[in-house]
């Protein structure tokens, strides 16, 4: 027999508080989780208001934390970061605030280190154009701005 766990509003509230306390969450993740818990829209609204009022949920804090984490760990560029935040329905104001978490010097330093590291991994490629393309594709996929990428590719592979 397959029974589906049901939650009272209080149980769901406690469960979601733990979910939000574990790591920063965006509204979309929390709403989705509540739907998966089979909560009705009215209950979801009540719980979301509670989470916002008690600071379990904060879109600005989420965006800033997300940007810092993905930049420092995955070495994503601004384009990719903005795209991923938009996917999570984060507003332009919060995206702009979050982007300020990355200093220009750290940004360029990380970009240069990533480009150098990638170049070492493709050094066996003999064709200059293929090598440039591999480097550029890698950096573009990670969300680095195209003008930076193409300038760097031309600089590193003359």
Image: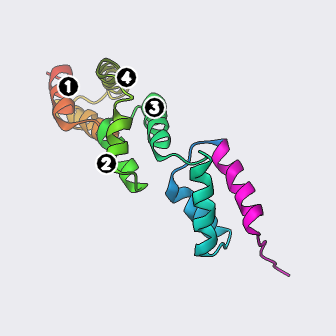
Q: CA distance from mark 3 to mark 4?
A: 21 Å
Of 96 and 107, the residue lying toward us: 96
Q: What span is colored magenta in the figure?
A: 1-21
Mark 3, residue position: 68
Viewer-side label of 1, 3 = 3
Mark 1, residue position: 152
Residue beneath the point at 32% across and 45% down: 93
Viewer-side label of 4, 1 = 1
**Marks 1 and 3: CB-CB under 8 Å?**
no
Residue beneath the point at 61% across and 69% down: 35
Q: Earlier in the sequence, mark 4 or mark 1?
A: 4
In the image, residue 85 above or below residue 139: below
Find out whether residue 14 is within the magenta segment.
yes
Viewer-side label of 3, 2 = 2
In the image, residue 141 above or below residue 6: above
Residue reaching furthest to the right: 1
**Marks 4 and 2: CB-CB under 8 Å?**
no
Mark 2, residue position: 92
Q: Earlier in the sequence, mark 3 or mark 4?
A: 3
Q: Earlier in the sequence, mark 1 or mark 3?
A: 3
Q: CA distance from mark 3 to mark 2?
A: 17 Å
Of 145 and 92, the residue lying toward us: 92
**Marks 1 and 2: CB-CB under 8 Å?**
no
């Amino acid at each position: 027999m397959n029974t589906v766990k049901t939650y009272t509003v209080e149980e769901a509230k406690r469960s979601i508080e733990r979910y939000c306390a574990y790591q920063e969450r965006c509204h979309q993740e929390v709403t989705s989780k509540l739907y998966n818990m089979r909560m009705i829209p009215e209950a979801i609204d009540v719980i979301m208001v509670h989470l916002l009022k008690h600071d379990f949920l904060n879109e600005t804090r989420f965006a800033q934390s997300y940007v810092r984490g993905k930049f420092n760990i995955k070495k994503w560029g601004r384009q990719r970061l903005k795209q991923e935040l938009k996917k999570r329905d984060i507003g332009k104001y919060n995206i702009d605030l979050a982007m300020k978490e990355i200093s220009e010097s750290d940004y360029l330093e990380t970009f240069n280190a990533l480009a150098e590291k990638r170049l070492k991994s493709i050094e066996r490629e003999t064709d200059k154009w293929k090598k440039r393309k591999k480097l550029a594709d890698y950096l573009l996929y990670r969300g680095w701005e195209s003008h930076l990428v193409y300038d760097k590719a031309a600089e590193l592979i003359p």
